[in-house]
Amino acid sequence: QPAETQPTSAPATQPAQTAPGEIDAPRGVKPETSQPFGEREIPIRSVLAINHVGRYGRTAVHTDAIEAALVAGQFTAPTDGQTVELPDGSSRAWTTIAAGDDGGLRDEALKGGYAYAAVESEREQVMILDAAGHSLVYVNGEPRGGDPYGFGFVRLPVLLKAGRNELLFVVGGGELHARLIEPRAAVMFDLNDPTLPDGLSGQTADLWGAVVVINTTTKPLEHARVVARCGEQTRETPLPAVPAVSVRKVGFAIPAAEFAAPSAAVPLELTLLGGGAELDRATLELAVRQPTELHKRTFVSDIDGSVQYYAVRPMSVGDDNPSRPALFLSLHGAGVDTLNQARCYAAKTWGHVVAPTNRRPFGFDWEDWGRLDALEVLALAEKTFDTDPQRTYLTGHSMGGHGTWQIGAHFPDRFAAIAPSAGWISFSSYVGEQRPEPASPIETLLRRATNPGDTLALSRNYLHHGIYVLHGSVDDNVPVEQARTMRKHLADYHSDFTYYERPGAGHWWGNECMDWPPLFDFLKLHTRAATETVRHIEFVTASPAISARCDWATIEQQIRCLDFSSIDLTLDPQTRAIRGTTENVARLTLQVAGAGLEPGAPLTLDLDGDQLENVAWPTESGTITLARRDGRWQAGSAGLGGPALRAASEKGPHRSGPFKNAFNHRVQLVYGTHGSPAENAWALAKARYDAETFWYRGNGAFDLVPDSAFDAQAEPERNVVLYGNAETNSAWQALLPACPLQVTAGHVRVGERQFERDDLAVLAVYPRPSSHAALVGVVAGSGLPGMRLTDRLPVFVSGVAYPDWTLLGPEVLRDGLASIIATGFFGNDWQLDAGQTAWQ
């Protein structure tokens, strides 16, 4: 999005570090099979460009005069010198820019602006758009994925109509490369973005890889298969559907060829089959390593079913190896490949270094899906290497230092110590975001949705582990004031932290700014207390859906959603009493069976002054459930029960908003086909754009399903996101009959309030019926203008969040946040009345 190209968004655009190195090129890609191109090319040698026409930032909405025209259906082809009136009353003009000798377009106008090109086509045809430097492109009005970081692997098939075709690029970095090239086949591999493991000597279990498939046809590619051959063995993997005129990164099984001695490469032959014919063939190469060498491992993610990878610097073999090694989870900086991250460490004699990906080198700043990736890899590594849960450590550099602060704060019972290096604290501290005070009610709820990113507000959780802070004194990327702020903050309450500021050092001062011996000496001195020995818990969370548990206590529900909730509890095993205070907690569970208490005798609970005597020992679950009723705590009364008896329909760690959570849990994007031709075309284009964006940002894959083919009874535990409204998307009535937000043609209802307009947009999340954990997301409009208004809401941008539901009109593109009509959080019963709502 343009927001990420402005000076206010430094975290997402900070340059790649000179070390641990630039992103690795895909290993072993053969040029003759890696290009999805034919011979005919349409170069884009000149464009009309205009600098930014609004105000952008890492925020839920932005202003933009050209987007306002697109939403209203009033955008027309610009001419040289034509002016555009900006939301603030000023104006800018379109100017012609010609490409340089290398085909690149460069100009100040391309820093946060637009570039327009018209392409003539003799006939309707599909071409491959090979472009970089743009956050998205409208192709004849339909949004398509971009390449804002200039990775160079975004090659999208686009349908050109006979005659004039319009390409409108949203650009940011001052440079754009673009061309249209004839595809070499109707369906083909593109090997420029593979995800591959390393083969390990002696390995016999199958592996997983992933590669991009391009579908240039106007129908989804269904029932296709990939056959992978490695040595004399083959594996055949059925593929999910690849959308029409789009791409999908697909996973496939790799046969374990009983890899012998390490070698530079082992051929991996891929064959794409479909419709009874061979569609394409390609060859990649796998490196083969010793299990004791630096290597990559792949896995199938529970988030979206895609294939992800992580890097490992294994523990060095020696006589002093512990029976259960330690685990060092190391988070990379912006633009750094995780293999290079792990390469910076020398092998340790007492533990394994494991580096997750954040889903991409820039990814999600270790928040949102980047945070989920780190947790997935942590769980896999603990199981794979049988590590000591009391000696798990968290560290990282730059953006990974921020991730260390963030993940360490959210999950204090997972780590014995954390060690951020050159880390920034939060988006607000790093970017210097200015937030007007007092905030309006709507701004207050929008900010509350971003509370999980407020590191300082979660920082009391650091009391659970030691901290080593490392920073260069002249860091010109992440100012040293970030570390000094944390040193001053920790000094007020934390007694177990070490601060080292390297004199004269910049952002990167060699491998030692991560593999710093005193840092690892500090980690070695720290062991995490076993849960059954923990007698005092002080814990704060912004969202139980992200972080609910600390040792034997779990915050199940909040009184005010996404406001900060805290507990301060002390357990006395002698008197069998748990005493303490809570803030913004509606429901709490205590896993007393795991707290080191002898089972049998009753317990005494004293919470916020409420005395609960003779609380029976929970013989079956080992868990006591407490809930607030009429302002007082009650334990084990009718309707409360234990975790197994909790009403699955209510909010909790198992299922909750805000809106972004709709894109977890192997989501299906269901687009409407029962509207007008233009509405149906929008729904498909928007779902496809979201899928392409998540592939680019998160190395992921979403299923696209027309509502006509969606079965509400099948796979009920998967999340679903609906595109359209109750009239244009037939899945709406099956999934959202009880939702208090209803959107139809020209009409939006929020509880008892009615709106008669065709230009309203709605984002919302609601529980999926007959499911214990799944959510339904809504990307809806009351008409085409409202639908188009959702196109560029930055759902996949870290640091941006939306509450459970948001209602807005096109006025936001002129006035910004002040024009959002309403937003809010549902109550724990998923109703409006019990939640929090703010109206304009």
Image: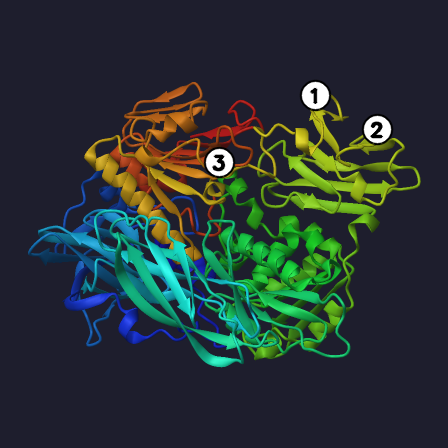
User: Which residue matches tag 1?
Assistant: 630
Mark 2, other Cα within 10 Å: few <14 / some 14–19 / many ≥20 = some
Toward which corner of the image does residue 505 lie, by quadrant? bottom right
In which quadrant will I find the C terminus?
top left
Q: Position of residue 289 (x, y in %)?
A: 54, 76
Q: Which numbered disc, 3 or 1, marks the residue that appears first in the sequence? A: 1
- Residue appearing at x 58%, y 32% in the figure: 651
User: Which residue matches tag 2?
Assistant: 616
* Residue extending furthest toward the right: 574
Q: Position of residue 413 (x, y in %)?
A: 71, 52
User: Which residue matches tag 3?
Assistant: 775
Left-right relation of 124 to 519? left
- Residue appearing at x 65%, y 56% in the figure: 408
Q: Nearer the viewer, residue 177 or 766?
A: 766
Residue 484, placed above or below residue 628 = below
**Marks 1 and 2: CB-CB under 8 Å?**
no
